[in-house]
Structure formats: structure tokens, C-alpha cells
Image (cartoon, grey):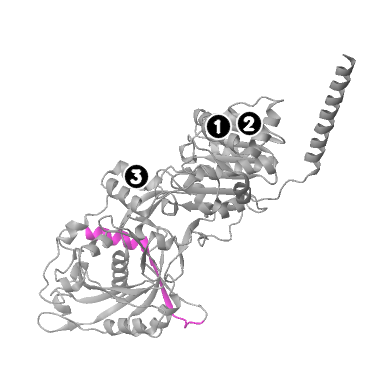
Amino acid sequence: MKKEKELKKMIQGKHTIHLIENIVKDSLTPPEDLTIAEWADKYRVLSRESSAEAGRWETDRTPYMKAIFDCVTDSITKSITIMSSAQVGKTELLLNILGRYMHLDPCPILFVQPTVDDAKSFSKERVEPMLRDTKILKVLVEKVNKRESGTVQEKMFPGGYVRFVGANSPSGLASRPIKITLLDEVDRFPLSAKKEGDPVKLAERRTNNFYDSKKIRVSTPTDDATSKIQLLYLAGSQEEWSLPCPYCGKHQSLEFEQLKYKDLIEPEFECKFCGESAIESEWKKYGQTNGEWIAKFPNEKENRSFHLNALASPWVSWKDIIAEYLSVKDDDFQYKTFVNTVLGKTFAVNLDSAMDYEAIYETREDYGAELHDDVVILTAGVDVQDNRLEVEVVGWAYGYESYGIIYRDFPGDPGKEEVWQQLDTFLRKKFKYKNGKFLTIAATLIDSGGHHTGSVYKYVYKKEKRGIYAIKGQGAWGVNILNGFRKTTKKGTPSVNLLSLGVNALKDLTYSRLSILQGTGKCHFPKASTQGYGIDYFKGLTSEVKVKKSTPRGMKIAWEILDGRRNEPLDLRNYATAAIELIPIDLHDKKYNRKGDRK
């Protein structure tokens, strides 16, 4: 009996020594210095019940996450906003952030779901499997929970805890100081947590006590008028995931409108710079490891915001995306879901219905010559793309009735002189009536925005006598159509008189004239197939609608391009319209009649 007691003491002593050794070892060993991506690649295991690809996590599978992970742990960024589609791994992104902080930088963490029930379900269905299968986290949680019991809504770990709450519960949002807030599906949050106000602000106010706090917000967007995630995105750096063109190497965001397809054959993505197209496997040849985030506001370092759509997803193909689009495009409700969950964009609520471009197409008429007899003066608009120049010539008659004369393009690099020489020859052209008389273009306005501003300035230099000017559009409301000239000061290019245009006012004017059925202001178009007025022209001419948009400063009215449309025809008609306003001629004066002769 005595020997048994001595043996027990000896064993207990060894256990105590072993426990002390472990405590000392844990306290003296510095934590690993790992980024979130490095931590996830080393430790994270995807659970079989919550992932299509169970097993070890690999950040290279979703390389667009790396920059997001890095800014979560840097010393500059305060808030991170991710407005994205479904099927890009955004939930796993949040779980990796949570796991890394639990292990290497323990602190108080608040994880907010739209409702309390959502929070409980998320804890059970996503977090608990991660804690079970990611061994380092399992050890941490078990170590603490032997002493303190965790709950579905709260998990304890050495040095901190994570609390899972609903955005509809003001008590859950307002309690305790918090270092890290993780807000999931923000656009499903209620407008107010009962009577306490905006749940996003309530939750993030808890971080004020921590100088190194982080605020992470993630959501698939909803409609444009009420989307919280869009407001947060617009207040940040506004970064788009971009891939290099397989041909020219220039990075560009993955815009759905650039996908070209026919009969569900492998779709191709058209480069907006060189115009070449390639299939998905060519664009993603390196698994997107050569992709990069391009920011609209790169100097915004404290508030980083990212937009991501399903075209970047490794789990859904471009062919599948096109198939889904074709199946829902004619159903407004399903199409809205497609815009939100596949394109990762808000659904715009149109204030006006889209114009019926097919009906306008059917009004085309036979002029009997290049010029209709009623035309008295010609103007032109020119748009500069990266691989071509586009031009429309418009004829004007008494009462500002307009006649489309010709719409065409000049393929070529606007950075080279050859394409401008072709345009110049065209702008000198004599356009003829049936009787053989002719008119030349009286004024031409050329857009100087985009990547070829210097080339535009060089072309228009000393061409004012021919009525050729560079223009710059202003998008604000209340801006007049013509807002005067200013001298340009771009280095390496000649100084020219740059005309400022109010583009919103021009769109209002053009659309009002397109709706006129007869008489003053009516728009006419030629039926001759050689003049360029096919069905695609009319789709472009009517490509925009007025919408109500959310901005960080509140609601505003804006013109927005309809999906799948190109708006160059509308822009060109606007420039030609501004040109007639620039010319000192009053077409309300009846002294102007057919062929420009005076009565």
C-alpha cells in the first residue's frame, strides 16, 4: 500500500513537471509570423460537409485572395470590403481570416450574420467542422473549453474568443470591445437593428478601443437603390481582379460584356485593348497566378475595396455562365439573381424603360442619295477606341430634324498616324444630293478621353478652321451642353482648345428626339445597307437607361449601359449633336430650306 502511494506521488510529480514544461514552452516560444495565405496553406483543412474540394487548402487555387489576405494583416489597412458573386470562395476567405487570428494573433472577434438563426447555423455548419478538421485550432479550442464551456454562439480560445451574432440583434452588436469584425452577407442585413440603427455601424463601433482593429465586410450585392455593400465598396479603393490578355499582355477586368459566344460553343473573351479573343483556358493558362488587382483609387490605402465576379471562379466555367445567362435573360426575376450572384453587381432599377431599338430600326427610309433633300448642314462625331476610330456623319434640316448619313469605323492603332490620315481624308469628303450638288462636314468633335489623348490633340492641332475640335465630357447633372473651351497643357503634345460637353444633357436631348414620331426634332435614318445603320447600330444608340444609384453621398440619378450593349453609337450621335449647337446657325429659322439654299 505504501509503495502504491509513493508510485502515485511519483507519477503525479512527473505530470506536474510535464505540464509546467509545456506551459513554459508555450509561453517562451514566439508565435509564427505567417500571413493569412501562408497560415491557411500550412494548417487549414477544408471539411467534407462544407466544401466541394475537401482536404488541404491551397491559396494558389484562388490567387485573387492573396492580396486581400495580405491587406488584412498589414499595418495600414483599416477596412476591407469585398463585393462579389457567389462561387468564388468568399466564405472560406472569412474562415481563413478567423482561423489565423485564433491561432497566431488571439483577440476578441465578432462574426456577424444577417440574423441570429443564420449565426447559429453558420457556427454549427461551417465553423465547427473547421475547428474539428484543422488540428491546430482543435487543440486550441479544446484546451480552453476544458475549463470554460463554449457555446454555439461563442467559441473560446487562449487569448480571445469569437462571438457569432445576428445583425437583427442590437444586444449582440453592442456588447464588449472587439478587435476584428467579420461581416458576412451585408446586403441581407436589416436596415436597422430594431431601433438601434445601422447594424454595420453598430458592429464596427465596437472596434474603437483597438488601434490595430480590422473591419472586414463581404457580400453578394442586391439592388442598386438599397445595397449596403456597394456603398462600402464605392467608399474604398474600388479594385477589380484583372488578367493579362494572352496576345498583348495588358491586364483588364473580367467584364461579362466582353464574352463572345455562339450556340454554346466554347465562349471567347475579347481583349478591350487589342481586340483579339481567346478561350477561358488561354486566359487562365497560369491558373490566374499572373492576375492582379487594379484599383480605381490606388492611393486609398486605409479603405481597400474589391469587386470579384464568377468569371474568375475556378469552380464554374465561362461556358456554364453563358448557359445560365441564356436560360434567364428573358425572365426579369431570374436575370436579377444572375446579375447579383454571377456578375457580383447590383441590379439597376430603371427610371425609364429601355427604348425599343427594333422599332426605330424599322423606321429607316430611302433618301434617294447620300443626302436627303431637306439636309442643310453636316456635322460629325468621332470616338477613339484602342484598335479603331468610329465616326458618324449627321445631316441637319429645318426644325433640327436630323438625318443619319453614314456610320463607319477605321481599324488601326490610334497611336499611329496612318489611321488618322484615313479619318482626315474621310472628313474632307463631299456628300451629294440627288441633283449632284454636295455638302462637306461643317464641324467635327472628337472625344479625347481614354488612352490616346495625345494623339487626338496632335490631330486636331491647327484644324479649327475646318471646325475640328477635341472634346472632353462632364458627367455631372445641371451641366450645359456646351461649356466653353480651355487651353490644354499635356506634356509632349501641342496645346489645343479643348471643348467641354455636358454629356447627361446631351443624352437627355438625344433620347427626347428619338421618341419624336413626326416633325420638329425627328431623327431619320437611311435604309441603304452601305451606310452602316444595321440593327447593332440601333442597339448601341439606345444602349443606356436612367437609373437611381446609391453612392456614399446618397441616392443619385445616372445613365447606365444596358448589359450586352456598346454605347459608341450613342456617344457619336451626342458629339454630332453638340457640333450643330457649336455652329452659329439657327435651324428654327425658316430661311433655311432644302439643300441649304436661302428663300
In this view, 8 is above or below 160: above
Report how many numbered discs are placed on residues in the image. 3
Along the viewing direction, whichever of 354 and 305 lies nearer the viewer: 305
Residue 382 image-quadrant placement: bottom left
Q: Residue at x 71, y 35 (%)?
A: 158
Q: Tell me the distance, in whole angstroms, between the alpha carbons under discs 3 and 2.
A: 37 Å
Residue 212 place in picture, x, y as percent: 69, 46
Confirm whether the magenta stretch covers residue 93.
no
Query: Which label sits on residue 123?
Result: 1
Q: Is residue 161 toward the left or the right of residue 333 in the image?
A: right
**Of the residues shown, which amino acid type is indicated by label 1?**
Ser
Label drawn at residue 336: 3
Q: Of the residues tagged 3 and 2, which is closer to the observer?
A: 2
Residue 138 visible from this viewpoint:
yes
Instruction: Compare marks 2 and 1 and give the one earlier in the sequence.
Output: 1
Per the rendering, the mark at residue 155 is 2
**Residues marked 2 and 1 touching at CB (< 8 Å):** yes
Q: Quadrant of the C terminus?
A: bottom left
Q: Nearer the viewer, residue 294 or 93?
A: 93
Identified by mark 2, the residue type is Lys
Q: Tags 1 and 3 in contact by the CB under 8 Å rule?
A: no
- Relative to 335, is 225 on the left or the right? right
State the image coordinates of residue 556 (x, y, percent, origin top left). Answer: 42, 50
Tell me the kind of residue under disc 3: Lys
Distance Cα–Cα, label 1 vs label 3: 30 Å
Q: Secondary structure at mark 1?
A: helix
Q: Which residues are magenta?
A: 492-514
Q: Residues within 10 Å of mark 2 (few under 14, many from 20)?
A: many
- Indicate yes or no whether the magenta region holds residue 507: yes
Mark 3 falls on what kind of element? helix
Give the spatial CA distance, label 2 vs label 1.
9 Å
